[in-house]
Image (cartoon, rainbow, N blue to C red):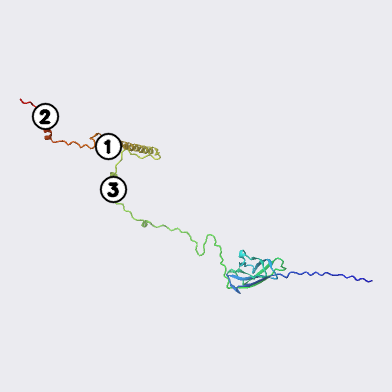
Amino acid sequence: MASTTASARTIATVVQDPKVDLCIGITGSLTSSPRGAAAQWIVSAWTTGGNVPDAIVRLQASPASVTPQFSFGCGSNDGTASCDLGAMDAKSAQRQLQAQVNVPATSTVPSVTLTVIGSAAHLPTDPQANATVAITGPAVPAATTSPLPVGSLPSIPTATPTLTPGGNAAGLFPTINPSPSGSGSSSSSKAATRAVADTSALPEGSSVVGAQLVGLGALVVAFVLAITRMTIRRRPSMATGSPAQSGSTGIPSGTPDAQPGTPDQNKDSSAGSGASANPTPEP
């Protein structure tokens, strides 16, 4: 009896993820740029086949004498040659950035080629693209300066000191003619002055402390005299009585003062009183 042995094979199929690519594009804003101005480019970045977790683009310029930089679209990375794009979604629109290269007016380069290079994790190769912009216009020659030799100036001859004899300077000053009456006026002024008694100039270097003490003493004496004078003026006013006190000893209020009579009336009254006081008996 024959037996048949059957063997089974297992076939495993490995399904790989679709290929993810980072695409880079660049084009010049203009085909040419004047010398002394900034040549500009538009940089584009996008993905195909899937998302990229972290994408970075860098700039390189040729010739190496010029420096490229991002001028718009990179946020804090503007002004540098590297731009971090972060995570990129395949369904999102293209990211567009602006780059530029400042070409000096003294530069003689005929054109500038700008290359943009992209990079991301798990990419087999870094994509790159480039574009060229022509530089037009004549170059301005750079100003050259040469150091001046010490002690000399250009176009100015060296001065040689010379000594010339001096002239008469009498005509530069006004003429003064003294009048003959000058001595008489001085003698009259001397006659008008008179000496002051008991006066003498202080010797040079003498101390003025004594004079200050004398002045201070005179000030104290004047102050004491002023206080004494004010005290004497107040005493008479305190000695005199008030009108109310003097009127309290007079005639009581409400009683009219007696009016003095005439001299004839006083005589009649005295005579009448005498007759009535001493009557003479009749015989």
Which of the labelled discs sits on residue 276, or is there none? 2
Which residue corresponds to mark 3? 185
Quadrant in which residue 167 is drawn: bottom left
Q: In the rendered image of this protein, does residue 13 appear above or below residue 203? A: below
The x, y position of residue 209, in whole percent, is 40, 38
In which quadrant is the C terminus drawn? top left
Q: Is residue 137 left or right of residue 129?
A: left
Q: Nearer the viewer, residue 52 or 116?
A: 52
Question: Nearer the observer, disc 2 or disc 1?
Answer: 2
Which residue corresponds to mark 1? 244
Question: Nearer the observer, disc 1 or disc 3?
Answer: 1
Q: Residues within 10 Å of mark 3 (few under 14, many from 20)?
A: few
* Distance from the alpha carbon under mark 2 to that under mark 1: 45 Å
Mark 2: which secondary structure?
Answer: helix
Contact? badges 1 and 3 (CB < 8 Å): no
Mark 1 or mark 3: name the one nearer the start of the chain: 3
Q: In the rendered image of this protein, does residue 129 appear above or below residue 276? A: below
Q: Nearer the viewer, residue 159 or 30?
A: 30
The x, y position of residue 20, in whole percent, is 71, 69
Q: From this viewpoint, is residue 265 visible?
A: yes
Q: Amino acid at mark 1?
A: Ala
Mark 3 or mark 2: name the one nearer the start of the chain: 3
Q: Amino acid at mark 2?
A: Ser
The x, y position of residue 117, in whole percent, is 67, 68
Which residue: 12% across, 35% down? 265
